[in-house]
Amino acid sequence: MGIISRGFFGKRAVGDVKLPPGQYLTTDFPVLSAGPTPHIPLEKWEFTIDDGTKALRRWDWRSFRDLPTENITVDLHCVTRWSKLGTHWEGVSLDTILGEIETDADYAMVRSYGDYTTNLPLADLRNKQAWIAFRFDDEDLAPEHGGPARLLVPHLYLWKSAKWVRGIRLMHEDQPGFWESLGYHIYGDPWREQRYSGDE
Amino acid sequence: MMWRSGTVVALHDETPTARTIALQVSDWPSHVAGQHVDVRLTAPDGYSAVRSYSIASPPNAEGRVELTVERLSDGEVSPYLTQDLGVGDRLELRGPIGGWFVWRSRQAEPIQLIAGGSGIVPLMGMIRSRASAGSTEPFRLLYSVREPGAVFYRSELQAISDGVDSVTVTYAYTRATPRGWPRPPGRIDASFIAETTWSSKLIPTCYVCGPTSFVESTAALLVACGNRPDKIRTERFGPTGDRK
């Protein structure tokens, strides 16, 4: 349609920064959450992989932190349109976490403390593109940003990077998570601008 | 989700930095209180920028959508919307968006609204929706502002709190109060929450909207006062968010 707003110039990104369509650059770290921030003591923290009927694997904080970790530098793209480039994290690769689990499931429901959920294909958690992150910018991850630990799956919009993760349910059929049930896209690829349900 | 054309039919300054924009939108599918829209501005050379703004007007079948936009000095879209836009201009928008931070007229529980600054906008949408739906469900609004001149919808809120089936409106001033105000300026604290919001025993649904730090601290106070976390719905805008 393209209505032109006379007198509007905007703030163009400078240099060669390439952002997904409809995103703008920010340098701070906005917070988006649907409810109060849960505070989970480390001694009560658990992370469980289950198949919907039984737990397949479970870690407490100590055994989780015994897993090999990686330093990660990635760009973040939030559906509310800000992008933040070159963020530094430390976390455990989902390849490590899923490594010993045999499953023919194709989908995953990520579950959080505070009852948040988000769904994604299991393939998107594999192959060096997803982590359970527990440090940001060389500091323990703050509760409002998802601490003690959050999913980091930066090739999808940031609502997929569930804060306060407590587990992953393996599923044979895709099911919508929290925002996916409330009008947001089932997959959420920022480069294809899959913001809302119905976006192609 | 398709882009629609909206024509500006009225403009009204709420404060020196915030303006209400009334739009007539063709084929608007109506909305639910608390939802937002995406607004797209396109420059003559084709560059465009999109931001989300909460809807302040109640659901209606006439295609009327009102937004109240706070101008951010370093913003990309809000300065244009609050300073350059004129009556008769057209905008592109799409929506309504969001199914969580909403109030539906079939809800029958007490409602606690808590606004920080321009976070009042979607909550005003809920108050107006309650009135237009003929609902008499008990609503309370706790509205935190820097100083008296920063209040949006002042006379309308006064009329609503004076009316029958009223909404109880309490102001919290953080920097400066009206003359003779009984409480010194300051942030909302636990005693203020306990004195002015619904008892958690009534199991109200709480809607908290404002800047991140405000929502973070207020939601924590509500939990500390015994409110169930799953009854507290939040919407936050960060320092760079052009939201609202």
Image: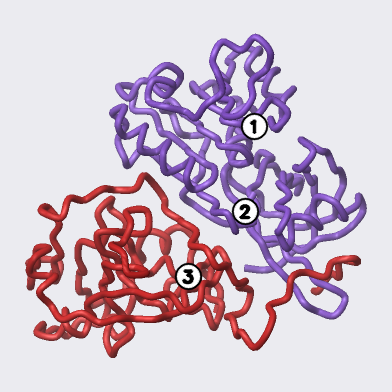
Chain colours: A red, B purple
- Whether B212 is drawn above or below A151: the answer is above
Say what amino acid the circle numbered 3 marks: His
At 60% across and 25% down in the image, what residue appears?
B134
- Whether A150 is drawn above or below B115: the answer is below
Q: Which mark is residue B128?
A: 1
At 42% across and 80% down in the image, what residue appears?
A74
The residue that mark 3 highlights is A185
The residue that mark 2 highlights is B243
Q: Quadrant of residue A138?
A: bottom left
Say what amino acid the circle numbered 2 marks: Arg
- Asked if disc 3 and disc 2 are in contact, CB closer than 8 Å, the reply is no
- The answer to which of B8 and B196 lies nearer the viewer is B196
Q: Quadrant of residue A186?
A: bottom left
The alpha-carbon separation of the residues under discs 2 and 1 comes to: 20 Å
Say what amino acid the circle numbered 1 marks: Arg
Residue A141 horizontal/vertical position (percent)? 31, 62
